[in-house]
Amino acid sequence: MAGGGDGAFIGAIHRAAARLDGEVELVCGAFSADAGRSRATGAALRLAPERSYDNWRAMLGGESRLPAGERAEFIVIVTPNVLHLPIAEAALRAGFHVLSDKPATASLAEARQLAAVVHESGRRYALTHTYLGYPLVNEARERVLAGELGTIRRVIVQYPQGWLAGPLESTGQKQAAWRTDPTQAGPGGSIADIGVHAFNLAEFVTGQTVVAVCADLASVVPGRAVDDDAAVFLRFAGGARGLLIASQVATGEGNDLSIAIYGSTAALAWSHATPNTLRLMSLDGREQYLRAGTDAAGLGATARSLCRTPVGHPEGFIEAFANLYRAFAADVRAFPAGPATLKSPAGIDAALRGMRFVDGAIRSSAAGQIWVNL
Amino acid sequence: MAGGGDGAFIGAIHRAAARLDGEVELVCGAFSADAGRSRATGAALRLAPERSYDNWRAMLGGESRLPAGERAEFIVIVTPNVLHLPIAEAALRAGFHVLSDKPATASLAEARQLAAVVHESGRRYALTHTYLGYPLVNEARERVLAGELGTIRRVIVQYPQGWLAGPLESTGQKQAAWRTDPTQAGPGGSIADIGVHAFNLAEFVTGQTVVAVCADLASVVPGRAVDDDAAVFLRFAGGARGLLIASQVATGEGNDLSIAIYGSTAALAWSHATPNTLRLMSLDGREQYLRAGTDAAGLGATARSLCRTPVGHPEGFIEAFANLYRAFAADVRAFPAGPATLKSPAGIDAALRGMRFVDGAIRSSAAGQIWVNL
Amino acid sequence: MAGGGDGAFIGAIHRAAARLDGEVELVCGAFSADAGRSRATGAALRLAPERSYDNWRAMLGGESRLPAGERAEFIVIVTPNVLHLPIAEAALRAGFHVLSDKPATASLAEARQLAAVVHESGRRYALTHTYLGYPLVNEARERVLAGELGTIRRVIVQYPQGWLAGPLESTGQKQAAWRTDPTQAGPGGSIADIGVHAFNLAEFVTGQTVVAVCADLASVVPGRAVDDDAAVFLRFAGGARGLLIASQVATGEGNDLSIAIYGSTAALAWSHATPNTLRLMSLDGREQYLRAGTDAAGLGATARSLCRTPVGHPEGFIEAFANLYRAFAADVRAFPAGPATLKSPAGIDAALRGMRFVDGAIRSSAAGQIWVNL
Amino acid sequence: MAGGGDGAFIGAIHRAAARLDGEVELVCGAFSADAGRSRATGAALRLAPERSYDNWRAMLGGESRLPAGERAEFIVIVTPNVLHLPIAEAALRAGFHVLSDKPATASLAEARQLAAVVHESGRRYALTHTYLGYPLVNEARERVLAGELGTIRRVIVQYPQGWLAGPLESTGQKQAAWRTDPTQAGPGGSIADIGVHAFNLAEFVTGQTVVAVCADLASVVPGRAVDDDAAVFLRFAGGARGLLIASQVATGEGNDLSIAIYGSTAALAWSHATPNTLRLMSLDGREQYLRAGTDAAGLGATARSLCRTPVGHPEGFIEAFANLYRAFAADVRAFPAGPATLKSPAGIDAALRGMRFVDGAIRSSAAGQIWVNL
């Protein structure tokens, strides 16, 4: 694991998710740019001292020198965005598979470079787009792809957060500090941090690509160098119109990513606030709720396989994350078998598309809300 | 009452709302373009036969000939949009006050003409923007105006309906037929029918005018002559960004107008699906719910005065509508006393602004999503 | 109208409900035991001065002396419980129909006397059990009676209110004062005030009578002379077990009467907090929501006929009440036609059963939670 | 681990919960009464073959023979109830700590015996009362204990499940089969399976013992040998009245344990359907929602320490379970330090109290709903 030291929320989530199903074991790490803090984290995690490295280059070097059966099988990247490319590139070139936090890179140019390296290396690469790990998100996708909604017409995907409504970065809070610093996060703020989740979710559930965007980005908190509030019109390949909101100044909101998809014959809606429920709506106004659960009536095999508990036993963020780990572990175990059947829901294509979206949205907004093709 | 015959949903709502508080009495009507049906409706409503008129011109003429104490004090217009101006103009010129359903007119040019007539006549004119009659919408406005939210940054107003997701107009359903016929409704479809409600709500609660719009309108159902799906970026006078959705092809949705307003220090959200609840959010994530009710803790005097029942006794659409009738009745009773203190929340200014919005959104969308100043 | 003067919440509701559909007109009243206040209320309601009476005896006398076509057709009783019987009895004997607020009387003995008078007089008598006016309560009943749930096994009906959690009666609040005074309310507190609503709802929706009760009543607020908190085991004629909660010391609660009925093949649940939604559950865990509305998919004719607005336009307490007025008006108009088809959902039988419940619960609790047959 | 083989829902949950925080490692197991199936489960879990035992006696024997640093530190019991006592007793006598699924034993007599053994052995013993692992359940308890609610008056705890509404046991479903078989489960059905959770939650959150019960138990599904539907009046040591529902024939319900506690000055309510939200209600009707999260405003230190994610990132059943494992691991690590500060929320006292409740409820119901002191 690269990154994820003390104070980094997402590193701990990655580790819990990796542990949950007992299929993945943390064997080495370089958790911080500060060698001392990196080693302290390693010690707290009871890593073998020699595999708690001073920095990620040392980790890649050290692990490469271990025998094949002993060394790490894949590298997890949970650093600020600007390090995603160099670490992923070095790891892939050194023969490791890579599981990276989103967004893929700090810029579209970097993402293109990453894609080239991934293809060249032939290694597994996946992105932890958490929400794709939720059972009912997968149920929604399967129902849409099966044509249950008819022609998709209108998509609304919303991601309101409130934690950056104040100038949190000026208080020394790490999470806020790097996310609002273009030299660490890249040019995108909320659009890259959470907009890319919303975009990814919309493409995943609809099974369609977004072909053009028209974006209204703003930096609302005085002094902030990146956008913290974004609204975007979307145009899907199938003709549907979309709307995406990604705001980190939605005062008081937690982390309620939601999506509603309206088709010519039916519609569905899912919200992270109630992740174990999927709302289905018919043309005549009938409304049905599906519940997640290993024993849930009306649920497809995919969704059921992503559940660990029966109906009525809530699963959440860590379980969704663990589903991504389980999928990636399966992909790694199957390596080097053919690429056609990767289980990870977001690979290098989704990674590249996400960065196209970020880049397109920034350019659209900078030009005063013009349409930009992705 | 002009319009509102058999089969017209909103006419019956107007009459129930007028009756609810016992302050307004229906004394005459021309309920249909068909004289026979008009008289049949009048009879069913137990009007005096001589005041059940063949058409609205006859009604205005007949009522004008009655002595001052006997004739109708004001005219309610619940016809298709294209008749709003001619009836309102004739009524105002004949000395009647006018309470009109929205949108004000079929076009912006007509709205300007109407505004001139209203000012010339000196009579009362108000629009039944239903949602402004809800107690907690007024509570929201008062809290925003009192500065509780700090600087408003982001506004999201959504109005999803599903009843026009199929080609209902081709089945002979009256409501659908005239709303999708530009010769009866004007050039706007969903943008004029429900978008104008959403726009009006956003301006009312924020207390700010929208200065520019960038709209993405579509006519989704094949063969439909007007827009049935709309998404609009808004820019408020105070700098806030807004987003407005007004779709009548949101399959399966009922009538859930909602608004969320995010400020620098707090936020609030209201939804028509739960109209007796107002959600308040603070910067640190604390969340509070206010309930409507004559005895509700934490509610301002305005909101309380708009309630008829204690907390826990739901009030709804008809009660909100009745609040508009009560306000207009008060304005009429006070006539001709000064205009400064009209109780009706939407008068000719709101009427004109609504049509500016419809016109601006249509122009913006036709030009490919450019910003249009209102 | 007898009772319902200034400060009486329910009198104003009755009047609004009576007005809503334009089928009932208030023509006379004795609104208070204080003649001056009674007349003041009458004046505020714009009654003819000669029909604003000093007291209810004067009203019955005065109205009786009017010609048949002019006098009141029925008397509405909205006084404290102890006056229900004397007014109803006098009115019925004088040839008036009677619409009474619940509970029917102050004691079971009185209810038996009332029943005798009703049958003797041959006049219409109905109770305003508000919740029976809600469209979806009727939908629930029809589905249960049609056998959709299979054998009913478990019923849970809950009525938590918080307004009497403090000693409100000692502050001079009228509503609290008479309800906690056995000389005005009878021996039952919460059991008679709201328990009787819950009981009535349970019998109405299940279509079964409760044959026995085992009750745990308490007077929680120090110094209070009647029960303010009640829990009751129920046994239904069909063998189902039931549970009823009626508490007025449920701190912070509004007025959320709810019922859940579990059968051998399906279940349903309704809550006054969301009165326009009915939850249906199947044996395998599928969950569906029905919405109220004149155009609602899946709704029976009865429920639709009790709606005034389409789906998504909330109706509430006053509309439910108005449905009771509409039903009683139809019953009165049909008089003296046969009793088989009365539209009022709660007549003298329900009135008597309600008082049997109150009496049985009080006796059960006093004896230390023994079973009492009703 | 004793029990928890293939087909046993709760065994897999225990293992996931144990893994989540990386503090507990599964080192041995006897997962089934069938030696072959036990070993197959051990293999699937990648246990060392020699520590995958044929049966629990062999496991206790084998582990006892290992050196102190190598053998299992504690034994987890996830078998049918009737095995809880023999395994726990043997394990404790052999010097192992014990973490057991609920209910403690199959009968009250057994529970008394277990308590004696626990005290004699001086080892750690805890019960996995899952719901005590939820952050907001702990927040509720702390607020109640701090006196925020004033005097507690009324407690309502409900646990409706629908999975046993049909005769599932006759289909060979394992979970249903042993739970409805008194020779495996003991004399209690739903009262012992879920009633004991509800009872435990009520005592935990109120901080009060239940001193007497009056129960109405039924066996609703034809042919079933144990109760499957229970309603119980409770009397708390502090005088509060309580009501407990535990039904496994609540058709269509999942697993929504909920509790509401009404005090003289405030109230609170929690529901497993929305476990990350705690509803607080004040005497005047103000309503506030607390959210779970490491960064949640208004949350006490205990509740925060039980969260792994920030506000808006749902945690669920496995995380709650993992909190119990974390607590027990801490208790075991601290062993043999003093017993005053055990972190496990349910130890042998709660175990014994739970069985007193089951026993008392069964006796009360059998005697026709009499009060039984616990």
Image (tube, coloured by chain):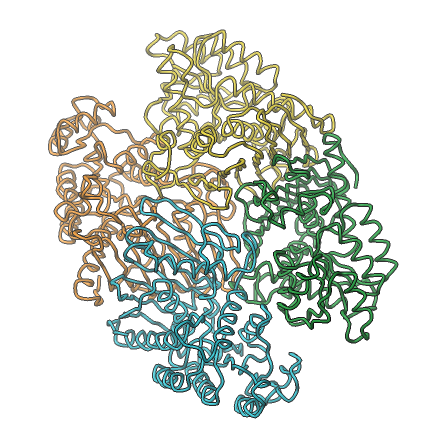
Chain colours: A green, B yellow, C orange, D cyan
How far from the left and from the top, in percent, is residue A349? 79, 53
Residue D147, quarter of the rendered image: bottom left
How far from the left and from the top, in percent, is residue D174? 53, 78
Query: Is A181 situated left or right of D7 in this image?
Result: right
Instruction: Using the image, determine if residue B193 lies above or below residue A235.
Output: above
Nearer to us in this view, C171 or D98? D98
Nearer to us in this view, C147 or C277? C277
Query: Is A337 situated left or right of C343 in this image?
Result: right
Numbered-mark total: 0
How far from the left and from the top, in percent, is residue C82? 14, 45
Residue beneath the point at 43% across and 41% down: B277
Instruction: Using the image, determine if residue B6 lies above or below residue C95.
Output: above
Q: Which residue is outermost to the front?
A: A36
Query: Is A88 situated left or right of C363 in this image?
Result: right
Query: Is B1 situated left or right of A35 in this image?
Result: left
Nearer to us in this view, C282 or B114? B114
Look at the image and tell me whether residue B131 can be seen: no
For the N terminus of chain B, give its image quadrant: top left
Residue A212, quarter of the rendered image: top right
For the C terminus of chain B, give its image quadrant: top right
Instruction: Using the image, determine if residue C172 lies above or below residue D354.
Output: above
How far from the left and from the top, in percent, is residue C154? 37, 64
Look at the image and tell me whether residue D41 can be seen: yes
Nearer to us in this view, D172 or C150? D172
Residue beneath the point at 57% across and 16% down: B111
